[in-house]
Image (spheres, rainbow, N blue to C red):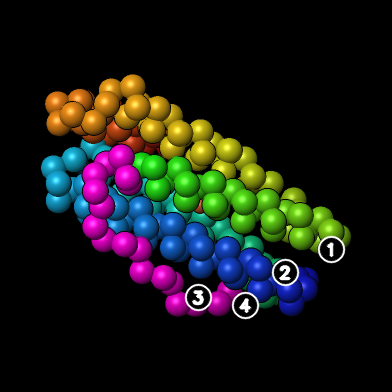
């Protein structure tokens, strides 16, 4: 049984995962419109992953007898300067999500809600992976540089990541 305050916190996180999904899906549209098909595929695949994060939380709230509540989700921005801005923002966003998860974990622990504490460990591990993934993408961009020719190769490399990840999924 979830406390009222834990339920409210988990619902906030559900809405945050929705926002993450919308943010990456919107970014993928920008990338596609600007001819960066690899980045578009990567971001789109990631948008789908964020929906899975949302659903996992949604199910947990239901299983513990709570009511998941979908609130108003902030609209992500539409225009970007370029791929650098997008990938800098994705990493910053993942760091923001990690901080939110860490806060949730701390609250669960302090309130002795060990079921939620245990459930959230999956998100701790997932955030570690996601920060690692997004920072490796940004490293690639920093290595290659921002000239149109290098962006072409960068985009192709990023497209390969989403292809490799899709093959890893059973
Ligand atoms: Fe997420
Ligand atoms: Fe994420």
- Residue occupying the point 25% across, 52% down: 80
Q: Nearer the viewer, mark 4 or mark 2?
A: 2
Q: CA distance from mark 4 to mark 2?
A: 12 Å
Q: Where on the picture, by quarter, is residue 82?
A: top left
Question: Mark 1: few, some, or many residues within 10 Å (few <14, many ≥20)?
Answer: few
Question: Mark 3: few, some, or many residues within 10 Å (few <14, many ≥20)?
Answer: few
User: Which secondary structure, mark 4?
Assistant: loop
Q: CA distance from mark 3 to mark 2?
A: 16 Å
In this picture, which residue range is highlighted in magenta?
A: 67-86
- Name which of mark 3 and mark 1 comes first in the sequence: 3
Evaluate whether residue 164 shows in this view. no
Q: CA distance from mark 4 to mark 1?
A: 20 Å
Q: Are marks 3 and 2 in contact (CB under 8 Å)?
A: no
User: Which secondary structure, mark 1?
Assistant: loop
Residue 114 x/y as whole percent? 81, 56
Question: Mark 2: few, some, or many residues within 10 Å (few <14, many ≥20)?
Answer: some
Give the label on residue 111, or none.
1
Give the label on residue 6, or none.
2
Q: CA distance from mark 2 to mark 1?
A: 9 Å
Q: Are marks 3 and 1 in contact (CB under 8 Å)?
A: no
Give the label on residue 136, or none.
none
- Name which of mark 3 and mark 2 comes first in the sequence: 2
Give the side of residue 42 with respect to residue 32, left or right: right
Residue 32 x/y as whole percent? 18, 48
- Residue occupying the point 56% across, 58% down: 56
User: Which secondary structure, mark 2?
Assistant: helix
Q: CA distance from mark 4 to mark 3?
A: 10 Å
Compared with 7, 87 (above or below) is above
Q: CA distance from mark 3 to mark 1?
A: 24 Å
Toward the top, the furthest residue is 143
Name the residue that disc number 4 marks.
Answer: 67
Q: Is 83 in the magenta?
A: yes
């Amino acid at each position: 049984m979830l406390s009222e305050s834990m339920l409210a916190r988990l619902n906030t996180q559900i809405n945050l995962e929705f926002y993450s999904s919308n943010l990456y899906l919107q970014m993928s549209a920008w990338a596609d419109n600007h001819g960066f098909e690899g980045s578009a595929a990567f971001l789109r695949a990631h948008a789908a992953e964020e929906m899975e994060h949302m659903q996992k939380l949604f199910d947990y709230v239901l299983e513990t007898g709570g009511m998941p509540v979908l609130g108003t989700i902030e609209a992500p921005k539409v225009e970007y300067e370029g791929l650098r801005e997008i990938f800098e923002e994705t990493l910053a966003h993942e760091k923001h999500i990690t901080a939110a998860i860490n806060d949730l974990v701390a609250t669960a622990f302090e309130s002795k809600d060990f079921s939620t504490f245990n459930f959230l460990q999956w998100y701790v591990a997932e955030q570690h992976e996601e920060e690692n993934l997004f920072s490796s993408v940004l490293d690639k961009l920093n290595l290659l540089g921002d000239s149109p020719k290098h962006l072409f190769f960068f985009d192709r490399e990023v497209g390969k990541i989403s292809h490799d990840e899709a093959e890893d999924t059973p």
